[in-house]
Image (spheres, rainbow, N blue to C red):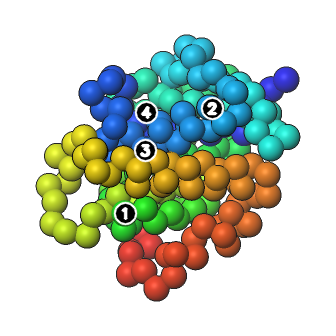
């Protein structure tokens, strides 16, 4: 049975990047895989992929094994392999433009400076795909690249686990009840945000 939806978590391959803000997309896919007994181990289109059922729908979970900034061709290849449209894609990734732990689901839009999304937009030729953006901005001045690739502190790990769990629940809501319901539930914290809607 072909998947009805492709859920892609963005990140960088390699153990040294596993527990970094830039790999929250991978961590959310890991959580979904664990919760729904899906093994994300098949090597397809320079990605690790797992097929299974979530909330009664057949889905593919994927973690591109190219580096973050060049993931577009891998994701495009997976869509083609499973004969899916970009509208059947959900991309999960970290977002420095959002406060730490805040979730924002969007149906389209620009990259807002995120290089992984720039690569996707370039490869897919459309901005019409669903995104779950996970806020990582700590609220104090940082050096962007150093921060997103820096290891989480031990004291942060429970907070990270909680954010990953809530993000996985948001993806489950998208799958089970659709984007509008998920947006109404998980975007509420964003009300009043001064974030630029690019």
Q: Dot 1 lies on which element?
A: loop
Q: How many residues crowd around disc 4 within 10 Å: few (fewer than 14), some, or many (20 or more)? A: many
Q: In terms of sequence position, does the residue under pointer 3 or pointer 1 come before the other?
A: 3
Q: In terms of sequence position, does the residue under pointer 4 or pointer 2 come before the other?
A: 2
The residue lying at 32 percent from left, 24 percent from top is 15
Q: In terms of sequence position, does the residue under pointer 1 or pointer 2 come before the other?
A: 2
Residue closest to the far bottom: 192
How far, Cα to Cα, is label 4 from label 2?
20 Å
How far, Cα to Cα, is label 1 from label 2?
24 Å
Q: Position of residue 81 (x, y in %)?
A: 67, 22
Q: Dot 2 lies on which element?
A: helix
How far, Cα to Cα, is label 4 from label 1?
24 Å
In the picture, measured across the screen, residue 166 lies left or right of residue 71, that is: right
* Residue under numbered circle 1: 100
Q: Where 191 sits versus 62, above or below?
A: below
Q: Where 77 sits versus 194, above or below?
A: above
The residue lying at 78 percent from left, 33 percent from top is 53
The residue lying at 75 percent from left, 28 percent from top is 52
Q: Dot 3 lies on which element?
A: helix
Is residue 3 visible in the rendered image? The answer is yes
* Residue under numbered circle 4: 71
* Residue under numbered circle 3: 24
The residue lying at 85 percent from left, 23 percent from top is 1
Q: Position of residue 180 (x, y in %)?
A: 72, 66
The image quadrant of residue 42 is top right
Q: Are marks 4 and 3 in contact (CB under 8 Å)?
A: no
In the picture, measured across the screen, residue 162 lies left or right of residue 175, that is: left
* Residue under numbered circle 2: 33
Q: In terms of sequence position, does the residue under pointer 4 or pointer 1 come before the other?
A: 4
Q: Are marks 2 and 3 in contact (CB under 8 Å)?
A: no
Counting every numbered tag in the picture gives 4
């Amino acid at each position: 049975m072909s998947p009805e939806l492709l859920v892609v978590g963005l990140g960088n391959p390699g153990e040294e990047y596993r527990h970094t803000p830039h790999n929250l997309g991978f961590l959310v896919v890991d959580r979904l895989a664990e919760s729904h007994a899906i093994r994300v181990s098949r090597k397809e289109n320079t990605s690790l992929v797992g097929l299974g059922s979530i909330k009664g729908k057949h889905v593919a979970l994927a973690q591109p094994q190219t580096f973050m900034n060049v993931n577009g061709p891998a994701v495009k290849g997976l869509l083609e392999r499973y004969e899916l449209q970009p509208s059947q894609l959900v991309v999960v990734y970290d977002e420095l433009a959002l406060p730490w732990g805040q979730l924002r689901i969007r149906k389209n839009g620009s990259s807002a400076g995120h290089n992984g999304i720039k690569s996707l937009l370039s490869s897919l030729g459309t901005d019409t795909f669903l995104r779950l953006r996970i806020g990582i901005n700590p609220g104090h001045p940082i050096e962007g690249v150093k921060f997103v690739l820096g290891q989480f502190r031990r004291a942060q790990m429970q907070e990270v686990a909680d954010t990953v769990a809530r993000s996985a629940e948001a993806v489950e809501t998208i799958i089970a009840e659709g984007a509008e319901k998920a947006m109404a539930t998980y975007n509420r914290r964003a009300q009043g945000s001064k974030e630029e809607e690019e």
